[in-house]
Amino acid sequence: MTNVNQTASDNAEEFGFHAGDLVQEWLWDDDVDDSIRAKIEELTGEELVDEDYDSAVDGVIIWWRDGDDEDELSDTIVDAYAVLGDDGPLWVLTPKPGRPGAASSSTVQSAAKTAGMNAATPLTVSRDWNGIRLRAFGKGR
């Protein structure tokens, strides 16, 4: 039985990624949580590809911080979804409240709505980061 307090970075499968999946990472910067990246790579057995990768991918993570342009986030979501195959998992990762760059979940929800997506409830993915899974309007939960 899994401890309820474990984070998604401890259980990377909570992201919805699987062995062999190719996961694309957007808006990487030196403040990202490398433990999240490592757990995803360990689970998938593949290195993360950057936003310049232009073929289909199985999943996406977008690192986003308050102070970044909300319109840029909407545009990034649209661009990321365009290369995402078969409605794979798409996550926006934001610093937790009280951390530098902490973003309001309502800001992410607004950007998601502008991009034609629904935003789920934030999930703790590490000590300093939350993740919000996005789905296209009309897709299953």
Image (cartoon, rainbow, N blue to C red):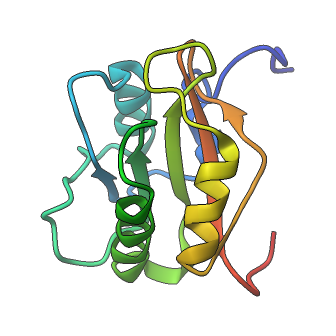
Point out the image quarter for the C terminus. Answer: bottom right
Drawn side of residue 121 relative to residue 102, left or right: right
Identify which residue, 83 or 117, lies in the foreground. Answer: 117
Residue name at image x 79 percent, y 14 percent = 5
Identify which residue, 99 or 86, lies in the foreground. Answer: 99
Drawn side of residue 136 relative to residue 83, left or right: right
Extreme bottom residue here? 138
The relative height of residue 30 versus residue 120 in the rendered view (above or below) is above
The relative height of residue 111 versus residue 45 in the rendered view (above or below) is below
Drawn side of residue 82 relative to residue 116, left or right: left
Q: Position of residue 91 (x, y in %)?
A: 53, 52
Residue name at image x 58 percent, y 21 percent = 10
Give the quadrant of residue 21.
bottom left
Extreme left residue here? 52
Q: How many marks?
A: 0
Give the quadrant of residue 59.
bottom left
Drawn side of residue 75 relative to residue 131, left or right: left
Q: Position of residue 103 (x, y in %)?
A: 55, 35
Q: Position of residue 114 (x, y in %)?
A: 57, 76
Residue name at image x 30 percent, y 77 percent = 56
The relative height of residue 30 versus residue 85 in the rendered view (above or below) is above
Residue name at image x 60 percent, y 13 percent = 98
Q: Position of residue 18 (x, y in %)?
A: 51, 53
The relative height of residue 112 versus residue 20 in the rendered view (above or below) is below
Give the quadrant of residue 96.
top right
Point out the image quarter for the N terminus. Answer: top right
